[in-house]
Amino acid sequence: MNRKSLFWDLTLKLEAFTHTVPVPFAVYYAIITQKMEPNHWKIFIALCLVFATGIGLLGTFIRHLLLKYLFAKIERMKLPTNGISSLSKEELAYAKSVKILLFRYPLVEAIIIVIRWLSGVIPISLLFFYLVEYTPSVTRSAIFTFVMIAPISFVTYYFITENSIRNLFDLPQFRNIELQEKDIPKFNYFTRILVAFFSLAALPFVIFSYILYSLASGEIAVADPMIPIVTVSFIFIVPLVVCSYVVAKSVNEGLNETSRSLGELAKGNFNVIVNPRSSDDFAKQAFYLNSVIGTLKNMYQEIRDLNEGLEEKVTLRTDELNQSLLDLSKLKVQQDGDYFLIYQLLNPFAIKDISSKYFQVDHFLRQKKSFEYKNRKYEIGGDINISHTIHLNEQKYLLFVNADAMGKSMQGAGGALVFGSVFQSIVQRTKTDARFQTLSPDEWLKSTFQELQLIFETFDGTMLVSLSLGLIAEGTGKLFFLNAEHPMIVLFRNGKANYLFPTITYRKLGTLGANSAKEVNEFQLQPKDVLLIGSDGKDDLLSKNPEGEWEVLSEDENFLEIVESTGANLEDMIREIDSTGQVIDDISIIRISYKTE
């Protein structure tokens, strides 16, 4: 399509619509809704004819200049001989600017027709007031004309122009010039239909309102009411048909373009490019389709490349996988070696060194992280059980601690390793240094807790440990204990299991700014009592709910029921816990039974 053919195509369509519908009816309604002297009518009609002709010619001339300017820019565009890569950065930027200008041209035509109406209606009214006299009915007629005609002219001009310039996007200069979605002016169909509906609805509303006002004021000059009725119907039907046609054609063009592209894609043509031709929703779809087509094209090419040397590539991939497995195996051996080293360091600290004729102590420890090293299985984790016999103030005490270092695998094991080494150092110091044996049980517990807290504070809050720490007097069965955010000790007495709720509890070891231990909890045990000190692994179980979904079962009351049902037998308790749900954490329990001599 050349410039002349586009010019005459647009001019005939646009000016035909303007001068066969809006202009004659505007003049007609100005005549029937006003009462003037005959010589005044001659002046008014002459002004309308002169300005209608002048504005039409001026609009046509402006269109000629705009299209001449547009095609001049198109002709200055360089044709890409070897694709986009043959254009320089400046040439590509220029081509994109011209293509964006082409998208904006329909809006320019639509705005110009609104300006044309203003340029005709306002001067006609002012010149009539100057040549004759100020007439209110002429002012009302001018406002009515603009409100009735301008919206429908805007919509019609936009759609007609957009449909006429679609073929320009197929020019060689534009065919391979790709724009970003954000570069194209947006005028989606929701807004288009809303504006078109408003424009069509404004026609009968304004016309009937003006007629009713003219009737009420006695200015209407019509003998037969059927003439304005028929005229109103016609003035509404013609724009309605024209507007509906151009909107439907715009939608149809977009659908046809999309359908053609999908049809080529269905035939296996992955070189098809969907070229956006309008600033509506179909332009947005064009970007999405091009993205999908590009993805499919790459996948298709990759499949072809794979099929061409499949056997060789399978061998190559197999070798790569074998090498990866070998590397992983080496890493696994190295990692298991590190785990084994931690196990070897941690294992000596889990001590049960008890000499008592009144108390029986049993330990159970199962860490979550298991590994295999040199065909043997081991476990590491953050839980630790320690029990000793120490002497304070020339009295024999049973010392126990159950601790849980925060973190999984190496992190938890590291915390347990630090805790075990420090705690064992304190115990050995107490056993060998008479000065520490002069402390009372509560003083020893507070001192030990504070020393541990100071050690773990040096890790700046990155290593935390919860624990239950206690002493039991051998002769009296008096229990002294501290709790640091650890599961409470369970007392099994006379077939019932209950928690020993501490009167005071402390923050985890290593918590920055935590208070020092100032008070120790006390409790008097009775013969045949059983104490169970354990970490939270015994309470957190993974189980299926009635709907068959996996969920974490974390209720302390479950453990009390297990203790009662098993009579506080350690092995039976572990079996019951395993049958209740899947253990998802380290689990450790110290069982202390108080028996008579």
Image (cartoon, rainbow, N blue to C red):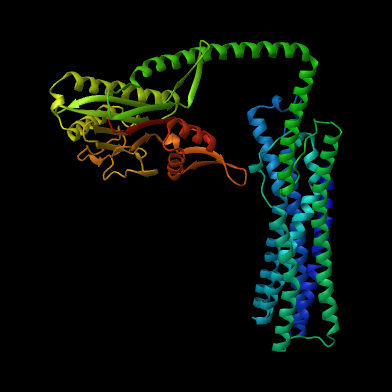
Near-viewer residue (391 or 422): 391
Describe residue 450's horizontal placement relative to residue 139 as left or right: left
Task: Kindly indicate the quadrant of the structure image that contains residue 494.
Answer: top left
Percent position of residue 72, x then y:
73, 40
Quadrant in the rendering for residue 197: bottom right
Q: Residue at x 77, y 72 (%)?
A: 26
In the rendered image, residue 478, in percent from the top left (x then y), is placed at 23, 37
Side of 492 where 374 appears, left or right: right
Q: Quadrant of the N terminus?
A: top right
In this rendering, position of residue 238 left or right of residue 423? right
Q: Nearer the viewer, residue 488 or 134?
A: 488
Tell me: residue 562, above or below residue 155: above
What x and y, as percent, mark residue 53?
Answer: 78, 64
Residue at 66%, 42% in the rendered image:
181
Q: Does residue 516 sit above or below 331 in this rendering?
A: below
Residue nearest the viewer, comparing 481 with 65? 481
Query: Horizontal and vertical percent for residue 354?
Result: 29, 23
